[in-house]
Image (spheres, rainbow, N blue to C red):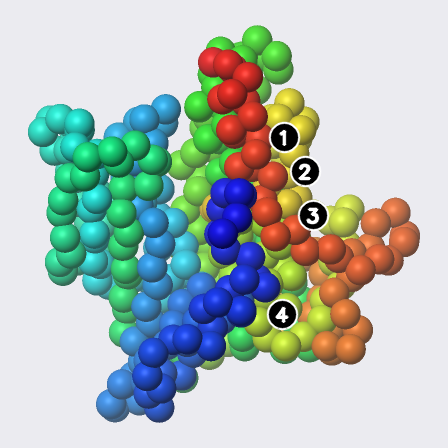
Amino acid sequence: MNDTSGKISHVAFEQLVLSKCGAKREEVRVGPYFGVDVSLIDLPGQMAMAVTSDPLSLIPSLGLEESAWLSVHLMANDMATTGFAPMYGQFVLNLPAAISKNDFKIYWEYIDKFCTEIGLAITGGHTGFMEGQNSTIAGGGTFITVAPKAEVLVSQYAQAGNSILVTKEAAISSSAILAMSFPETVRNKIGIENYQKACSLFYQTSSLKDALTAVGENRPGAVTAMHDVTEGGLLGAIYELACASGNGAVIYNEQLPVGHVQHEICRLFSIDPRYSVGAGSMIICCQKGTAPSVIERLRRENIPCVEVGEIKEKDYGIKLTQNGVEQDLVYQAEDPYWAAFFNAYKAGWK
C-alpha cells in the first residue's frame, strides 16, 4: 500500500477506514477520528468509558525495561488526554519465537511494575510466539477507564479563544531513542555530555502526570482539551487538535520549547525537532485568561509549561508565525524520525 513507516496518513485513514467501522451504536459518543486519542462510550448513570489502543514495543537496541516502559506509558499518555488515569489494560503479545523464557519473564515483570505504579489492573489479553516476528512491535494493547461523562475530555472539545500550552520540550522521545540506539556515533559526533543528557530524557516520555496536574481537582475547569504529542511532533499535534475540534489555530514558532540536547540530536540526524515524535509532551488547551494558573500548577510539580498559541475560528486556518511572518502550517504526514532511524541503521551507525 505504501513504502513509508509510521501511522497511516490522514487521507488514507479517511478513505480506507473511517467509513467502514462496523455497526452504528448510539452509545458511541466519540469514535475513530483524526487527532483524537481515545474513544468514548456512554454508560448508564451519567458515566462514560474511555478506550485507547497502541502497539507494544520490544526494541532490542533499547532493552527490555525501556521497551516495557514505552509499551505502558505511550498508551497511558493517550488516556491521560481525558484528564483521567487508565484503570484497566488488555495486552496482546505476539513475541518473537526466539525470545528466551528469561527475557520474556523480565519484560513482563517490567510491564507489571509500570502498570502497578500508575494504578492499572491487567485484565486479560493474549500471549503467543511467532516465527519470523523480528520487528520492534510485539503486539498491541488497550487501556480503559470509566469516569463521569461530564468530566471526560477529548481533543474535539477545544474552543476558539483557548490558549494553547505545551509541557516540557519538543522531540523528547525521538532524541532519547536515537541516542540510545546509536550511542557510539552520538558520543563521537556531539559529545558524551549531550549523549548522556539525551539518554536521560527517556523517562520523561510519560505525560500522565502533566495531564492530571493541568486538570487539577476542579472538574470541569480551565482545561478544555488535550492531545498527546506523538508522530508529527509539537506542530503535528497542534494541527491534529485543531482539525479534531473543527477549529483553526495560530502558533508562535519562537515560543515552541526546543531544548539544547534535542536541537543537537536532531541536527545530527537531520530532522526538525518541531515535527519529530515527542512522547512526554502534552498539548493543553485552556480557557482564555487561565493559562497562568495552569502553568503555575504544573510548575509546582516541576513540569515546565509554556503558552505557544491560540485556537482560532475555523476560517482563520492553521497558521505558524515565524520571525514576524505568518504562513499556513503544512502538515507533514510522515514523521522524519522513521527515515532518520533507518538511514542511520543502513549507514552502519553504531
Amino acid type at circle 2 is: Asp
Compare marks 2 and 3 and give the one earlier in the sequence: 3
Q: Is residue 116 depicted above or below 261 in this figure? A: below
Q: Which residue is mark 4?
A: 243
- The single residue placed furthest to the top in the displayed view is 188
Residue at 35% across / 36% down in the picture? 136
The residue at which mark 1 appears reads as: 266
Disc 2 + disc 4, Cβ < 8 Å:
no
Farthest left residue?
101
Amino acid at the residue labelled 3: Leu
Contact between labelled residues 2 and 1, with CB atoms less than 8 Å apart: yes
> In this picture, is 48 found above or below 232?
below
- Between the C-alphas of marks 2 and 4, the distance is 22 Å
Residue carrying label 3? 256
Residue 138 visible in rendering: yes
Question: SS for tag 3?
Answer: loop
Amino acid type assigned to the residue bearing label 1 in the image: Cys
In front of the other: 75 or 25: 25
For label 3, the crowd category at 10 Å Cα-Cα, with few meaning under 14, some 14 to 19 and many 20 or more, is some
- What whole-number distance in Å separates the C-alpha atoms at marks 4 and 3? 20 Å
Cβ atoms at labels 1 and 3 below 8 Å apart: no
Rendered residue at 28%/68% (across/down): 145
Marks 1 and 3, the one that precedes in the sequence = 3
Task: Say what secondary structure mark 1 lies in.
Answer: helix
For this rendering, which residue is in front, 244 or 6?
6
Q: Which residue position holds label 2?
A: 272
The x, y position of residue 6, in whole percent, is 49, 46
- Within-10-Å neighbours for mark 1: few <14, some 14–19, many 20+: many
Residue 92, percent from left and from top: 21, 52
Q: Is residue 26 left or right of residue 319?
A: left
